[in-house]
Image: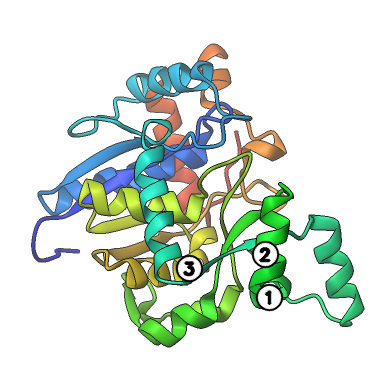
Amino acid sequence: MTLPNEIVTRFAPSPSGPMHVGHLLAALHARQLADVNGGRCLLRIEDIDQRSCSPEWVELMHRDLEWLGLRFDGEVMVQSARYAAYQDALRRLREMGVLYPCFCTRGEIKAQLAEIGRAPHSSLGYLYPGTCRTLPPEQVAEKMAAGIPHAWRINMQRVQELIGCPYWEDMRRGVQRCVPTAYGDVVLARKDMPTSYHLSVVIDDAEQGVTLVSRGEDLFEATHIHRALQGVLGLPIPRYYHHSLLRDNAGKRLAKRDGARSLASLREAGYTATMIYKSLSAALANGGIWHI
């Protein structure tokens, strides 16, 4: 699979727990796509959620990567050192008139969806019904002055008016049409987290010069949001490669929150890196079912 121009990929784990073999698969895809095209593969630490991320997990991640013999190019980017860049992007969006404060609590949003008799839903969660999008300016000013907690949402209807429905290229699925409104007015920042995954990832991919985003197919739908943000912020548009996921014997994808067995625990149990790679190859040959 040879691509034109310089290929820059990235592996961007979140240090909210120990890595498992699913992370290894993501890292290998990114590294191999760069290598086969004579490009570079970067490492980025996505630690914006300081409630769940910790230096302990970062240190363990580096030990795992070293044990597995995985190398990366250039300096490591750490998201928690880049809040100024994210705040600048939020400022620009406010100036464009596409960002608005949302004062709804999660409970209120659920009640609103129940009241209208539907709960539009995707793999990204329930779609916000746009309650605060049309609040009169005086009400917004009053709530802000009163210090009522709020999140900042992006008005995707306005974004779609500005950029239309642009396209992106997925190397497995072909050319895709972005529909900015498809997943509602997502949150880009809130009081306890001054940026979001969606905002940070597009800002950082642009800053690092990433030309090919390699990640799991569970993030395919999020690309609509990312392509919309790239369009409205005038950022470069990378290609995408959404690879298949590893699953357990029950067919459920491996995830930290579900207690997927960590690479560190396998190392401590006596497995070698060679054994892990052989097991991974066997899993891929067996439809992605991981047995260890």
Q: Compared with residue 101, is residue 61 higher up or lower down, i.e. above or below?
A: above
Q: How many other residues sit within 10 Å of disc 2, few (<14), some (14-19) or many (≥20)?
A: some
Q: Contact, CB < 8 Å: mark 1 with mark 3?
A: no
Q: Contact, CB < 8 Å: mark 3 with mark 2?
A: no
Q: Compared with residue 159, is residue 8 higher up or lower down, i.e. above or below?
A: above
Give how far across and how far down residue 112 sits, in percent: 85, 72
Residue type highlighted by circle 3: Ile
Q: Which mark is residue 136?
A: 1
Residue type highlighted by circle 1: Pro
Q: Is residue 245 left or right of residue 249?
A: left
The residue carrying mark 2 is 140
Q: Which mark is residue 225?
A: 3
Q: How many other residues sit within 10 Å of disc 1, few (<14), some (14-19) or many (≥20)?
A: few
Rendering quarter of residue 26: top left
Tell me what residue is drawn at x 39 percent, y 70 percent: 227
The mark nearer the N terminus, 1 or 3, is 1
Give how far across and how far down residue 91 sits, in percent: 41, 56
Whole-number angstrom distance, CA of label 1 to CA of label 2: 6 Å
Q: Nearer the viewer, residue 189 or 250?
A: 189
Tag nearer the camera, 3 or 2: 2
Q: Contact, CB < 8 Å: mark 1 with mark 2?
A: yes
* Res. 73 in view: yes
Give how far across and how far down residue 244 sits, in percent: 48, 58
Q: Is residue 99 left or right of residue 27?
A: right
Question: Looking at the figure, which quarter contains the C terminus?
Answer: top right
Tell me what residue is drawn at x 39 percent, y 87 percent: 164
* Secondary structure under the numbered disc 1 in the rendered image: loop
* Secondary structure under the numbered disc 3 in the rendered image: helix
